Image (cartoon, helix red, strand yellow):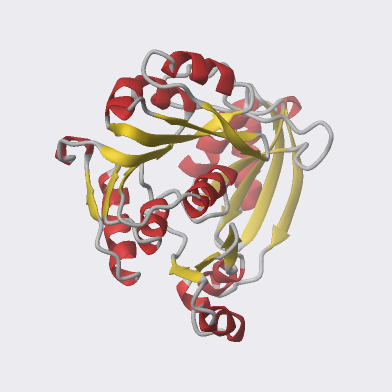
Amino acid sequence: MRELIIHGNEEIAEDISDFLLDHGALSVSVEDADRDTDDEQPLYGEPGMELSTFAWQRNNVIALLDDDTDVQALLLSLAVEFGEDEYTVASLVDVEDKDWVRVTQTQFDPMNLGERICIVPSWHMDSHDVLQIRQDKSNMVIQLDPGMAFGTGSHATTRLCAEWLEQHPLAGKSVLDYGCGSGILSIIAAKLQALDVLGVDIDPQSVETARGNALINQCQIYYGLPNELPEGRYDVVVANILANPLKALAPLLAHSVKPGGALVLSGILEGQYEQLIAFYRPWIQLEVWNADEGWVCLHGIADA
């Protein structure tokens, strides 16, 4: 296989990506050409937010090509389609054929959350380090493989919510994990002796993934789609989503908390939390609990 990298500006990057896929590229990705420099340009988007920019000012369009690809013919077609002055061919290199499953696995190591939570991919469960961690019964080891649902513990918002759950007594309480993704937060709640734990997600794939993860970790948790959520209120409602969906869900989430119960929200950028606090004020008084890597976790107690 070979890797072709093309530099292009934001007006042309997406079109070049589509062109390469249409002409036989095995895969194409677009990255910020200024990544990991002072000129790196963050792009944020979420449901309900209309994006004005779909690429960076300077982009690397990275295509993986089969060995049988006629690269010269491909580049000639590219020049005819876009004009050679509109982009730059940065590199064309051979890519070593590898066991990509094993390569991917090496990128995911056991991960500590909070004081005693350890998220472990299945291929590390029998490693010496993990066996030592498991010897201390006060540690919580959760087996979780990276997959098609959000929530491996690597993102700051997941860490914030996990740490909140760990630092607040949950034994015997009911917990609703709204936007459960992989099920990581609801599994943590169940491991912390929460009595009645439910997880909800709008994505059927996430619901199935969460069910499988709960089974692997020997947790009894109900998972379903929003229209399958049983009526009721909960001692703790945690929602790690994004700011705009959290606004849309405000009445539902606030009314799902028992009097005296806690609402925990994350997926909120530091520049968004004041607006979220103001938006939820008719239902519940929120405040910043903690922040990590530019993300904020809010919490509040429902009126008794």
Front-most of residues 29 and 237:
237
Can residue 108 be seen by looking at this rendering?
no
Give the image location of residue 136, x and y in percent.
54, 80
Q: Residue at x 62, y 31 (%)?
A: 13
Relative to residue 57, is residue 64 depicted above or below?
below
Which image quarter holds the C terminus? top left
Name the outermost residue toward the front.
304
Q: Is residue 262 left or right of residue 256?
A: right
Q: At 53% from the left edge and 77% from the top edge, which residue is drawn?
A: 124
Q: Position of residue 287 (x, y in %)?
A: 54, 27
Q: How many marks?
A: 0
Horizontal relation, residue 110 to residue 34: left or right: left
Q: Is residue 72 left or right of residue 184?
A: right
Which is more toward the observer, 253 or 59? 253
- Quadrant occupied by the N terminus: bottom right
Question: Residue extending furthest right?
Answer: 38
Q: Is residue 111 visible?
A: yes
Above/below status of 151 relative to 288 = below
Q: Quadrant of residue 156?
A: top right
The residue positioned 55% from the left and 61% from the top of the image is: 68
Instruction: Please give the name of the residue rendered at 59% of the width and 29% of the height, measured from the top-left corner.
Output: 269
> Can you give x and y, in whole percent of width and height, for residue 71 in the image?
63, 51
In the rendered image, residue 96, in percent from the top left (x then y), is placed at 66, 70
